Amino acid sequence: MKVLVIGSGAREHALIWKLSQSRRVSKLYALPGNGGTRDLAETVDIDPSDVVSAADFAEKEGIALTVVGPEQPLSLGITDAFHKRGLKIFGPTQKAAMLESSKVFSKEFMRRNSIPTAPFQVFTSAEEARLYLEGAVYPLVIKADGLAGGKGVFVCKDKAEALQTVRAVLVEHRFGQAGEKILIEDFLPGTEMSFMVISDGKRAVPLVTAMDYKKAQDGDQGPNTGGMGAISPAPGARKALCDRIMGEIIYPVLEGMRLDGREFRGVLYAGLMLVEDAPHVLEFNVRFGDPETQPIMLRLKSDLLDLLEAGADGNLHDVAVEWSEQVSAGVVLTSRGYPGSFETGKVIQGLERAKAMGVEIFHAGTRLEQGKLLSAGGRVLTLCASGANLKETVRRIYDAIGFVGYENICFRQDIGKVKE
């Protein structure tokens, strides 16, 4: 069968890599893909936000299943557009995708459905937010309401930093429409965990856990990014905890969404904080995480196509999923300056030598031009590996990174280190 993957990042490259191993896949397409997906999938030169053109292509080519990677097409209603034409697609509807596209909607939904999360307030007025900050307890967290590429969350250590953030979002409109509303919520101390499930609307199959590293610099310093690396499993991911997450968070969300007329089919990603081992939701995403998906795909032994198709069809009870007991990890290579301003168009070298070290290389911001592989984004590559233990797995990745070169290369050197 023909399968189309929407998106251009390392997450989509990892999904294509795994789907290419399915005996049921006759041809893969990447819309629009990147410099690395070309080896596995035919490139489709359409912007993922152009949902009508994407549906036109799928209909014309007889695509049997479309898999949506990034959040933006989902928030624009790509699933609804495909459903209107009778096309099978894996991803939530526009109404269900509001769990990610509006943090205000998500937090209010959690409050109504008694899902554990931090206390919060919503503001549209900078002046009202300033008044609230005068008597607030610090540190606290300020979030832009809409989609901001993982960069709209700010942990503010004091009032001055919080006031500066409010001004940047509500007065200077740094995030445009995504920042028309903000959340101010209590800071939750603890250990983060990424918990993803495949849902068919009623049932859910959990993926193995992961933990990502959001901050740009070593030691969890600097601004938030889309993710600088990930490990799987997450520290402390015991079965009892995973069962608790399913019972207290995942199934209440699916039931609450169904009762609201927003049945959720796709990936439900709970970004969690474990506060004294009790899971609290920091945020929901409605698609595979990036960079968590990359190391998770290395641990999946089952056919990914079977799992995604069952989620789209509403019959997950027919699918058994098998995982490797090995650990895995991924380190993201970026352009210096990310998540701020950065330069692109730098020649990338050494990937074959790096791959010979036993790593998988998933492309994100890359493009081919006149036979040369060039950097084309903030996050450029994710190097991943799996092994018997985390220390040796991470060491192998960093050894391989030593062979990769491009001007202004940047990466965290502490992926795999966990706070005690």
Image: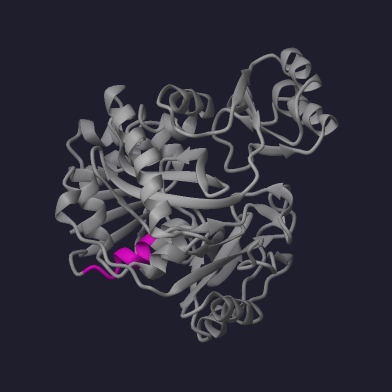
Tell me if 369 is positioned left or right of 99 in this view. Answer: right
Using the rendered view, name the quadrant where residue 331 is placed.
bottom right
The colour scheme is: one colour
- Residue at 42% of width from left, 75% of height from top? 326
Q: Is residue 285 above or below residue 37?
A: above
Q: Is residue 17 magenta?
A: yes
Using the rendered view, name the quadrant where residue 12 is placed.
bottom left
Q: Nearer the viewer, residue 10 or 293?
A: 293
Q: Is residue 79 above or below residue 272?
A: above
Q: Main secondary structure of the magenta part?
A: helix
Observer able to see residue 62: no
| Residue 241, percent from left and from top | 43, 52
- Residue at 52% of width from left, 52% of height from top? 193
- Residue at 53% of width from left, 59% of height from top? 364
- Residue at 16% of width from left, 46% of height from top? 315
> Which quadrant of the rendered structure holds the C terminus?
bottom right
| Residue 131, percent from left and from top | 78, 15
The total number of labels drawn is 0
Observer able to see residue 371: yes
- The magenta-colored residue range is 15-22
Q: Is residue 379 magenta?
A: no
Q: Is residue 219 above or below residue 125?
A: below
| Residue 347, percent from left and from top | 64, 70
| Residue 82, percent from left and from top | 26, 36
> Which quadrant of the rendered structure holds the N terminus?
bottom left
Q: Is residue 139 above or below residue 110?
A: below
Tell me if 196 is positioned left or right of 211 in this view. Answer: left
Using the rendered view, name the quadrant where residue 155 is placed.
top right
Tell me if 231 is positioned left or right of 258 in this view. Answer: right
